[in-house]
Amino acid sequence: MPSSPHRALTGLSHPFRVTKGTRFRLEDFSTDDTRGLELKDESDGLLEDCSVVMADLQERLYAQDRWSVLLIFQAMDAAGKDGTIKHVMTGLNPRGCEVNSFKSPTTEELDHDFLWRTTRLLPRRGHIGIFNRSYYEEMLVVRVHPEILGHQQLPPSLVTPRIWRERFTDVVNYETYLSRQGVIIRKFFLYLSKEEQRRRFMERLAEPDKHWKFSLGDLPEREYFDDYLRAYDDVIRHTATAQAPWYVVPADHKWFTRLVVASAVIEAIESVRPTFPTVDPATRRKLKAAELQLKNEPQTSRLARRGRGRRQ
Ligand code: ATP
Ligand code: MG
């Protein structure tokens, strides 16, 4: 495995990791923290370096075919989910990596329990799955706009004030189950300030090439910014666990967000030390024999091959 400057990032994500929610308070975290590091100019190089390391880890994970990795990204609009996901993906082999985005549920999805649509898209063993939004929306957007519950086809007797607590419990149990099945779960909340969101929205509106990134619905949603923060605070407090930690990643500086996420992902995969499978002695002897057979095969000269081609 390449040992390289990405080691400089070891531990970078630790201050932002929440493994136990009981004492968690979002206000203890900051949106513009960079740990005093002045790595903006070096960040592209460091991220490239991380990509090389991640590609190697992914190959081992895939070859070993035991563990899978689920990376969940949650954030307000313009916090940089897409850009961060793009950077995490760079260098990964698409054969073993999938990204899925979750928007408002379809009629078919609403006809099932809320974990149904994401469960179908969980990464298979050896794969890395990225969720751009997830079942956590059920405790975020739905909590901020509780009228959505009315469209969820739930039996009315089950819609009580306890519903959020119940969803937290269900999600923790679900993630515990998944981790016992070999799914390595890491959850990222890209924590953006309201002021930085305003700046990014204005940038999108000022540049015609960025208009497509702005949706008119984003502005009314901004009115609920503080409600979303309260919902995130509660979600993280109730669903941060050792097996499925949250990372509250400062998102006002994109270069820092990406470095924190990259280092957290590398650490997550390294934690299970994926190794290439080894073969038993009998198979190894057969492979040796195959190698010998290929070595001793009479070589056809290029001239003979060409001549034969002409005759056909
Ligand atoms: P971008 O804006 O960069 O394209 P996005 O993730 O914000 O990415 P949008 O299409 O703008 O994508 O928004 C998707 C919307 O779907 C969000 O407002 C989100 O809250 C909503 N959504 C996702 N899951 C659910 C859910 N289970 N119930 C209700 N709304 C949901
Ligand atoms: Mg959006």
Image: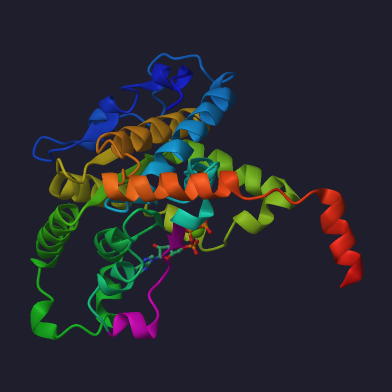
Q: Which image quarter is the C terminus in?
A: bottom right
Q: Nearer the viewer, residue 70 or 290?
A: 290
**Total marks placed:** 0
Q: In this picture, is 54 found above or below 206?
A: above
- State the residue lying farthest toward the right: 310
Left or right: residue 143 compared with residue 180: right
> How does the figure colour the protein chain or chains?
rainbow
Q: Which image quarter is the N terminus in?
A: top left
* Residue 41 x %, y %: 59, 19
| 150 part of magenta stretch | no
| 101 part of magenta stretch | yes
What residue range appears in magenta? 97-111
> Where in the image, quadrant-wise, is ligand 1 located?
bottom left
Q: Report if residue 200 is visible in the image.
A: yes
Task: Identify the residue at image location x=61%, y=55%.
Answer: 213
Q: In this picture, is 78 found above or below 47?
A: below
* Residue 128 x %, y %: 39, 52
Task: Identify the residue at image location x=21%, y=52%.
Answer: 182
Name the quadrant containing residue 16.
top left
Name the quadrant containing residue 12.
top left
Q: Nearer the viewer, residue 161 or 108?
A: 108
Task: Identify the residue at image location x=27%, y=44%.
Answer: 281
Name the quadrant containing residue 145.
bottom left
Left or right: residue 283 compared with residue 292: left
Left or right: residue 93 compared with residue 141: right
* Residue 237 x %, y %: 15, 44
Q: In this picture, is 242 found above or below 5?
A: below
Q: Report if residue 280 is visible in the image.
A: no
* Residue 47 x %, y %: 52, 29
Task: Identify the residue at image location x=64%, y=42%.
Answer: 203
